[in-house]
Amino acid sequence: MTAGAGRLRVGVVGLGRLGKRHAENLAYRVPGASLVAACSPVEEERAWAREALPAPRLYDDYAALLADREVDAVWLVTPSSLHAQQIVDALRAGKHVFCEKPLSLDLAECERVLAEAERYPHLVATIGFMRRFDPSYRDAFDKVQAGKIGRPFLVRSQTTDMNDTEGFFVRFAATSGGIFLDCTVHDIDVARWLLGRPRAKRVFAAGAVALHEGLREFDDVDNGVAICEFEDGKLAMFYASRTQAHGNDTHSEVIGTAGGLTIGRNPRANRVEIYDATGVRNECTPSFFDRFEEAFLYEARAFVEAVGGGAQAGATLGDALEATRIGVAMRESLVWGEAVDL
């Protein structure tokens, strides 16, 4: 069965903590999709798939999954350093591609993927900037587009994670690309999206190691701030953190000539408020999985619709290249201690 004749047959590649979420969505919650294959080099992850998923064909080798003619599209949830070549290989195999961010940690690799994708205009390729599908972010975008706040010229956005006392992000630092490419890249995409996709001119970044000393070995920090100047006088301000005590706190603000909008300023887990001797409070979202559960689902549905002939709703490869370009410049600014022109 082909994608045009029925359900889109998807193969998930990578079954780590995020890959499992995507796999379950595609298997059970995305109309028009059928999860038919999964790939991981880790036996424990393939064992999980046997138990949790509806009998997909399992592979320990990506090339073998690409050779499967019963797979129409691949869903890449793999290490960032593998994304570029895996996207190219999928396109050459005739598969549609969804890939988690970033497109690549290397600008030349991003450009190589874009050039390759131009050879396959009939194939859909998108990058997983899921905030575009979060209902609140989408509502803010629609209001900006409708002129509700005048001309938007400034975005303030942050991605801050609950402190991980077990040091996952220290172990991850060698391959993450640093805090700006790992975390702030989402905020960069949101800022460009809300501001009308302007091109960046200059960035400045600074950071601090508040708790995780092991990050110094990788020229990384656990708290970082950055400013980005865009064309036409537009600006963005970013904050990223690995050390929050209260939970995952992701929020954004867009300011225009006639008003402003905030998205998610209070990182509430739900609408319950607690009144006790300590005061009035609400519980917070513990992780980005919980904060963006709906967004992950809606982006999967949008990808399936795009393959079926609908409009491209997610971030394009070009959008992802620009996010990487800005993120790389922020990392350079952090290391060098001076502004970087783009």
Image: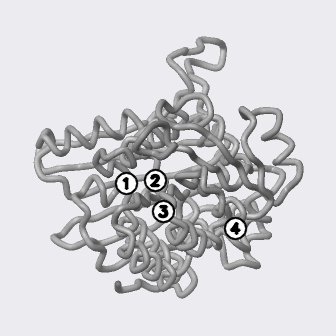
Which of the numbered marks, if any, corresponds to residue 185?
3
Which marked residue is nearer to the observer: mark 1 or mark 4? 4
**Residue for point 73% across, 54% down:** 39
Q: Earlier in the sequence, mark 2 or mark 4?
A: 4
Q: Amino acid at mark 3?
A: Val
Figure quadrant of residue 61: bottom right
Label 3 vs 2, first from the N-terminus: 2
CB atoms at circles 2 and 1 under 8 Å apart? yes
- Of 205 and 201, nearer the camera is 201
Q: CA distance from mark 1 to mark 4?
A: 34 Å
- Tell me the amino acid under the disc marked 2: Phe
Please tell me which of labels 3 and 4 falls first in the chain.
Answer: 4
Mark 4 surroundings within 10 Å by alpha-carbon count, few (fewer than 14), some (14 through 19), many (20 or more) = some
Q: Is the residue under label 4 in contact with that under label 1 (CB below 8 Å)? A: no
Q: Amino acid at mark 1?
A: Val
User: Going from the N terminus, do you reach mark 2 or mark 1 first?
Assistant: 2
Q: Is residue 337 above or below residue 241?
A: below
Q: CA distance from mark 3 to mark 4?
A: 29 Å
Residue type, numbered disc 4: Ala
Asked if the residues shown at circle 3 and circle 1 are in contact, with their CB atoms under 8 angstroms apart, the answer is no
Q: Is residue 64 above or below residue 261?
A: below
Give the CA separation, mark 3 to mark 1. 9 Å
* x and y percentages locating residue 81 in the rendered image: 64, 73
* Quarter of the figure with the C terminus: bottom left
What residue would you read off at disc 1? 190
